[in-house]
Amino acid sequence: MKNRKFGEYTLDTIRRNGSGEGAYFGNIQFANGYGASVVSHKFSYGGSSGLYEIAVLNPNGELDYDTEVTNDVIGWLNQDQVSSYLKQIEHLGRKKLYNTVDMLTALNAKDVTTERQFKNGTVVFEIPVTKSSINRGYSVTVASYKSGYVRRLNAYSSPYQLNPTKRSPDLSYGGTKVKRILIPNPIDRLDYIVDYIIRNYK
């Protein structure tokens, strides 16, 4: 099965051995952070009949059995059906994204992302401060990074990490150490920025 095209979608082929002649393994990742794994081999659902099996991948690249698309893998699919499921996965979280964009608009957020930052998967917003306990007349700038980090950007110092933290044992020196928790989903990072701004500056 050499065809990697499913409607408008072209998947990245993964090389694997031991699954029979003509076996197909392909992955794709979408801008919303989710992805899909599409396979067809002698052990997959429908593979012996030349059909495909699809599974949803979360932003960490792991199988996700808790989405509105499906709670399991889906088998016995032809190429058109695979394309239809890929579109559903591509649109996962769209309603949530619209709500988040509405919140950023309500906060008078200004997108100040440079072209270079955008190409690197970084999104930067400048938001005016209105909290009465803080002097007005300046803005706070926050950024979402493809790596999973969220930072407040300062003009005269290093970026300040905003990710949630957890404590873990420090095997080198004893006691505990603080570790930042990454937020792999880009929509979740924007939600986190909205919550941070409201808690601290609004």
Image (cartoon, helix red, strand yellow):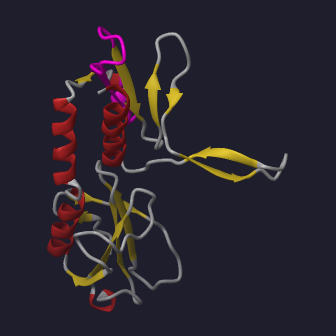
Residue 5 x %, y %: 24, 63
Nearest to the observer: residue 30 or residue 129: 129
Residue 67 x %, y %: 28, 69
| Quarter occupied by the N terminus | bottom left
Nearest to the observer: residue 155 or residue 168: 168
Q: Residue at x 16, y 45 (%)?
A: 98
Q: Quadrant of residue 145?
A: top left
Report if residue 6 is visible in the image. no
Does the segment drawn in magenta span residue 150?
no
Q: Residue at x 44, y 61 (%)?
A: 61
Does the segment drawn in magenta span residue 132?
yes
Q: Report how many numbered discs are placed on residues in the image.
A: 0
Q: Is residue 100 above or below residue 51?
A: above
Residue 117 x %, y %: 38, 26
Instruction: Tell me which segment is drawn in magenta.
Output: 116-138
Give the left or right position of residue 35, taking residue 146 as reference. left
Q: Residue at x 30, y 11 (%)?
A: 136
Q: Quadrant of residue 77?
A: bottom left
Q: Furthest residue to the front?
A: 133
Residue 151 x %, y %: 46, 31
Q: Residue at x 35, y 34 (%)?
A: 199
Report if residue 153 is visible in the image. yes
| Quarter occupied by the C terminus | top left
Give the left or right position of residue 115, taking residue 178 as reference. left
